[in-house]
Amino acid sequence: MAQFSALVDATFMHLGIDAAFTPADGAPLSVRVILKAPSEVAGLFDTGLGGTATVGEVRASEVATPSAGDQMTLDGHTYLVRQARQDDLGLVWRLDLDKQ
């Protein structure tokens, strides 16, 4: 497990950017985030509507329990956490974000 953790840390140091993560009921934390904008498909009456979603990945070692309503600020933009899911190893949180 330590090998995976070291790999995740190295990935975030090289690919991540600095951000401020603010829990809904707490003080801001300095974190590294990998920001993505994958396509998102939503079904409506059996038709696929395409759009983009903003996803931020943060290390669980930096953010223990993110939840809906938390905020992330990076590059002068603020995002609201819509949903948080942890990876199978418990090392990374995937945050679905809405730009404010």
Image (cartoon, rainbow, N blue to C red):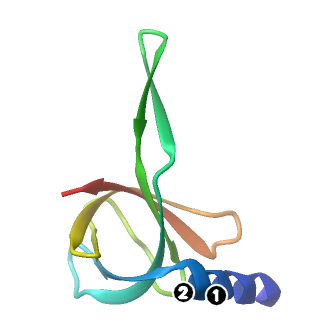
Tag 2 residue: 61
Q: Amino acid at mark 1?
A: Asp
Question: Residue 70's quadrant in the figure?
Answer: bottom left
Say if 48 sits above or below 38 in the image: above
Say if 8 sits above or below 79 in the image: below
Around disc 1, counting alpha carbons within 10 Å, would you say few (fewer than 14), some (14 to 19), or many (20 or more)? Answer: some
Lower sequence index among marks 1 and 2: 1
Nearer the observer, 59 or 75: 75
Q: Tags 1 and 2 in contact by the CB under 8 Å rule?
A: yes
Asked which secondary structure carries label 1, the reply is helix
Q: Residue at x 64, y 87 (%)?
A: 9
Q: Which mark is residue 9?
A: 1
- Estimate the spatial distance between the alpha carbons at disc 1 and disc 2, rounded to whole Å: 9 Å
Question: Where in the figure is residue 33, as x and y percent of width and height?
Answer: 46, 76
Q: Quadrant of the N terminus?
A: bottom right
Q: Quadrant of the C terminus?
A: bottom left
Question: Where in the figure is residue 10, as x and y percent of width and height?
Answer: 67, 88
Nearer the observer, 70 or 99: 99
Q: Is residue 63 visible?
A: no
Q: Amino acid at mark 2?
A: Ser
Q: Residue at x 65, y 81 (%)?
A: 11
Circle nearer the viewer, 1 or 2 = 1
Say if 59 sits above or below 79 in the image: below
Q: Residue at x 26, y 63 (%)?
A: 79
